[in-house]
Image (cartoon, rainbow, N blue to C red):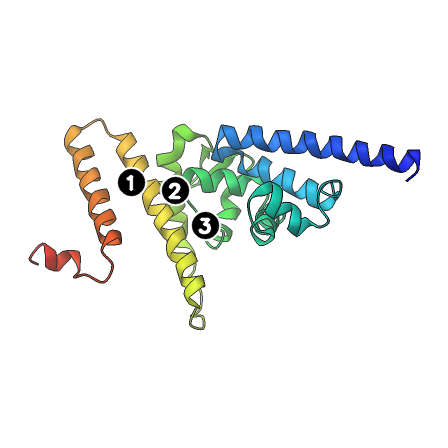
């Protein structure tokens, strides 16, 4: 190996080290850094910064990211398709990649525009954003019936809708100061949890004697 080849390898290794350090820092901050995280993954993959430590992108993902190549590629694909704002809105409202195209036209810079009102994409506005997203989705034209989905596709859809419901419950809980309202919200959340822990049992209506 020539001096120049060695210098290139060292430089690439240093670049990779810096990027991985940024990734660890972002992971420590939390979910709102998902867009920046995806951008770092894209840079590592597209610039092949993984080469000093792994023979392939797949091997690098498994060894250094603790995730599959498919998962990393999916994050990058979402970034390429929707841009960073998708990750931010998804974190705040639980909106899925399937639902986002119906809302995307209402995104203006760092705000969600609905009925002439611009709602900034910040955590304090999460309850308003969730309500606005629900209204926009309700207005979206219904899609034609699709062929029966696979179990995996149905599960992914249910998981996305479940995250939306969970985000709405959290936002509703945090938006009220009434002890009675908060207790009612917690009762609903507990009931949903019990249903999930007891698959195949009778419906909640029958358990309540309806």
Identify the image quadrant of the C terminus: bottom left
* Place of residue 107 in the rendered image (x, y in percent of width and height, measured from the top left): 52, 41
Residue 193 seen by the camera? yes
Please tell me whether residue 144 is drawn above or below residue 21 in the rendered image.
Answer: below
Of tags 1 and 2, which is closer to the observer? 1
Residue at image x 24%, y 49%?
192
Q: Nearer the viewer, residue 69 or 166?
A: 69
Identify the image quadrant of the N terminus: top right
Q: Residues within 10 Å of mark 2 (few under 14, many from 20)?
A: many
Q: Quadrant of residue 9?
A: top right
Question: Does 19 sit left or right of 7 as displayed?
Answer: left
Residue at image x 33%, y 43%?
166
Which mark is first along the chain, 2 or 1?
Answer: 2
- Element under label 1? helix
Residue on which the image places disc 3: 96
Tag shown at residue 132: 2
* Place of residue 54 in the rendered image (x, y in percent of width and height, measured from the top left): 71, 45
* Place of residue 132 in the rendered image (x, y in percent of width and height, measured from the top left): 39, 42
Residue on which the image places disc 1: 169
Residue at image x 80%, y 32%?
10
Question: Does 65 sit left or right of 205 as displayed?
Answer: right
């Amino acid at each position: 190996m020539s001096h120049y080849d060695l210098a290139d390898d060292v430089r690439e290794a240093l670049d990779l080290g810096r990027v991985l350090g940024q990734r660890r820092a972002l992971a420590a901050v939390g979910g709102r850094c998902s867009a920046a995280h995806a951008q770092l993954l894209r840079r590592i993959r597209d610039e092949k910064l993984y080469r000093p430590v792994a023979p392939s992108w797949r091997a690098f993902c498994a060894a250094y990211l603790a995730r599959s190549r498919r998962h990393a590629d999916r994050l990058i694909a979402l970034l390429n398709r929707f841009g960073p704002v998708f990750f931010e809105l998804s974190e705040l409202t639980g909106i899925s990649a399937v639902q986002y195209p119906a809302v995307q036209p209402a995104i203006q810079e760092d705000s969600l525009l609905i009925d002439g009102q611009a709602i900034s994409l910040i955590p304090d506005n999460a309850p308003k954003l969730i309500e606005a997203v629900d209204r926009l989705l309700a207005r979206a034209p219904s899609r034609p019936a699709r062929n029966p989905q696979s179990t995996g596709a149905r599960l992914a859809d249910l998981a996305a809708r479940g995250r939306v419901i969970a985000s709405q419950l959290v936002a509703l809980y945090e938006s009220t100061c009434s002890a009675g309202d908060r207790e009612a919200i917690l009762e609903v959340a507990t009931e949903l949890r019990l249903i999930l822990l007891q698959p195949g049992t009778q419906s909640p209506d029958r358990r309540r004697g309806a």
